[in-house]
Each structure stands twice: as C-alpha cells, then as structure tokens.
C-alpha cells in the first residue's frame, strides 16, 4: 500500500493508474466500521482504491475542538492495509492549504441547502466540507467517490456540487450501518458511557422506524409536522423524568435532493433527526419507502 503525504508524489503515481478505474473514500481518519464498509464498497467498484485521511480545519467552527479530534494514524493505516486499499493520501494542513486556511478559494454551496438542519448549528461547516472535497477530487482524480448516507446533508451538498460544477466523478452513497439494536454507527457513540445513555440513544432510530411504520400502515401521504411531533413525544415520554436527558435539536422531513422541508410524508422523502443524549450530539436519517 502506498502512503502519500504530498500532492506531487500522489500525482506521479496517479499517472501509472491511467486506464484503471479509481474509487476515493474521503475520511478524516479514526476509521470505524462505517468507514470500513465504505472502503469495501470502493474495493468492489474500482481497480484502484484510494482513502484520504485529512482532518480538515476548514469545516471546524471556532467552538469545535480541532486539536482534540482523534488522529490514530497507525491504526488507520493498518485498517486500510487490511482492507486492500491501494493508497492512502495523508496530507498535512500545510500541504492542503499552503497559504493558510483563511486564504483559500472556497466552494459556497447554495444557502438553501446549508442554512438548515446541521448547517444551522455549524455555520461555515458545509462550505469547508465542499471546499476540501473539491480539492480532494481535483488531487486524486477519482471515477467514483463513496460517502455514507448517515451524513445525508453532506451527501446532498456534495451531489449538488458535482452536478453544478460538472465534476467527472460518480458519487456512490452507502447505506448507514447500524448495530443490532438499530443505533447508527458513529465515532461519537464511544462518548455514550453508561448503559442508560446507550439505551436513550436508540430514541433516534426508534422515531425514524416509527415514521416508516406509520407510512407503511397509511393509505395516503401523511401530514409531516403532526406525525413527527406525535412520534417524538411518544418515544421521548419515558425519558422525560429519567436519569438521561434526550433533547431533539431537529426532526424534519425533506426532499432528499434539495433538502427543502416537505409537508407530507410519502415514499422518497428523507426524515432527519439530530438529538443530544446528555452532552453527546447524534444524528440519523432514513429515506421513506
Ligand atoms: O465526512 C467526513 O468525514 C468529512 O466531512 C469529509 C467528507 C471527509 C470531508 O472532510
């Protein structure tokens, strides 16, 4: 497996892969089972698999601790090696932003897609994501790029960028991986320390399954606001007086492409949820069928 830390070294090797298909899995490292599923998908898609590992300063807000973000380099490289990755692109911040992150040309996705949901609580985050992803595409020149559906807003914004800027890359969404009880896999789950917190975290997927079930049982589209409010209240009721606080930050039904809220629940609509379980912020979503 190659390990490249500079754009120049990567590009030299990229020439040798001319004529082969290449799949990129962009990550910020700390690779968990969810990432590993993306890498396996990439392995099945293309001749060459490249994983990028870069903790992107541009997508962290001033209140978010960039320095504290985990960087288990040896462990990540061992995982990539084991999964048959051909190359890891592991640049430094200076390599990615030689003039400094404050002096870089940025990609500005449409406000209509970034102002709501996660974007409302993380100003500038999706601009930082879109900018680094465009740079990673430009550097690695993939035919495919695999992204998890768990970060549904990020995925929609990247798909929009690829469409609007005519980028020659096919975005491959990968379904969210869940544990046996339905909890979406995430590096944040490690912060759920007590069994009660782990139990409370299931509220997110329980609300989503409740929405799906309501729709499956319905004979016509359902009023989104009313059903989401009712399910949220029902699922959270046992936690109101409990030892763990569960606070929903947003629960919404959106068009999966434009990310604009929709008023009716029907197949093809994406339902999004973000909630705090004590201090741990979790997100989840599902596409209604
Ligand atoms: O989802 C992530 O890990 C990051 O947002 C990404 C896409 C690698 C960009 O830094």
Image: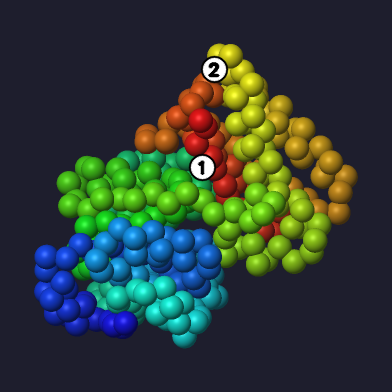
Q: Position of residue 73 (x, y in %)?
A: 46, 82
Q: Is residue 158 visible?
A: yes
Ligand 1 under 8 Å from disc 1 Cβ: no
Q: Is residue 157 above or below residue 145?
A: above
Q: CA distance from mark 2 to mark 1?
A: 23 Å
Tell me where residue 57 sits by quadrant: bottom left
Circle 2 crowding by C-alpha within 10 Å: few under 14, some 14–19, many from 20: few
Q: Is residue 221 above or below residue 167?
A: above
Ligand 1 under 8 Å from disc 2 Cβ: no
Q: Secondary structure at mark 1?
A: loop
Asked if marks 2 and 1 touch (Cβ < 8 Å), the reply is no
In the image, 85: left or right of 181?
Answer: left
Q: Residue at x 82, y 45 (%)?
A: 239
Q: Which residue is mark 2?
A: 221
Q: Position of residue 282 (x, y in %)?
A: 61, 53
Q: Which residue is mark 1?
A: 117
Tell me the mark number nearer the camera, choosing from 2 and 1. Answer: 2
Taking the view exactly as shown, the residue that stands out farthest to the top is 220
Q: Position of residue 16 (x, y in %)?
A: 13, 76
Q: Secondary structure at mark 2?
A: loop
In the image, 107: left or right of 123?
Answer: left
Q: Residue at x 39, y 55 (%)?
A: 147
């Amino acid at each position: 497996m190659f390990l490249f830390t500079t754009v120049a070294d990567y590009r030299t090797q990229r020439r040798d892969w001319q004529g082969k298909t290449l799949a990129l899995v962009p990550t910020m490292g700390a690779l968990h089972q969810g990432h590993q599923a993306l890498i396996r998908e990439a392995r099945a898609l293309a001749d060459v698999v490249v994983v990028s590992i870069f903790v992107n300063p541009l997508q962290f807000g001033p209140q978010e601790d960039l320095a504290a973000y985990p960087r288990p380099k040896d462990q990540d490289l061992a995982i990539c090696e084991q999964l048959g990755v051909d190359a890891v692109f592991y640049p430094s911040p200076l390599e990615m932003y030689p003039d400094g992150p404050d002096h870089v040309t940025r990609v500005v996705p449409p406000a209509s897609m970034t102002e709501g949901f996660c974007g409302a609580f993380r100003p500038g985050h999706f601009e930082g994501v879109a900018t680094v992803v465009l740079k990673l595409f430009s550097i690695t020149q993939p035919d495919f790029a695999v992204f998890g559906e768990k970060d549904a807003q990020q995925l929609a914004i990247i798909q929009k960028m690829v469409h609007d800027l005519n980028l020659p890359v096919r975005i491959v969404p990968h379904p969210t991986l869940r544990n046996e009880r339905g909890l979406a896999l995430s590096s944040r789950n490690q912060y759920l320390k007590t069994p009660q917190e782990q139990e409370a975290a299931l509220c997110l997927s329980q609300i989503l399954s409740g929405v799906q079930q309501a729709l499956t049982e319905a004979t016509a589209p359902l009023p989104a606001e009313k059903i989401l409010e009712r399910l949220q209240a029902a699922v959270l009721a046992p936690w109101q007086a409990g030892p763990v606080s569960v606070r929903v930050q947003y629960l919404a039904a959106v068009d999966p492409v434009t990310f604009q809220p929709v008023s009716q629940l029907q197949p093809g609509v994406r339902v999004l949820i973000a909630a705090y379980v004590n201090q741990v912020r979790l997100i989840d979503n599902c596409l209604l069928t």
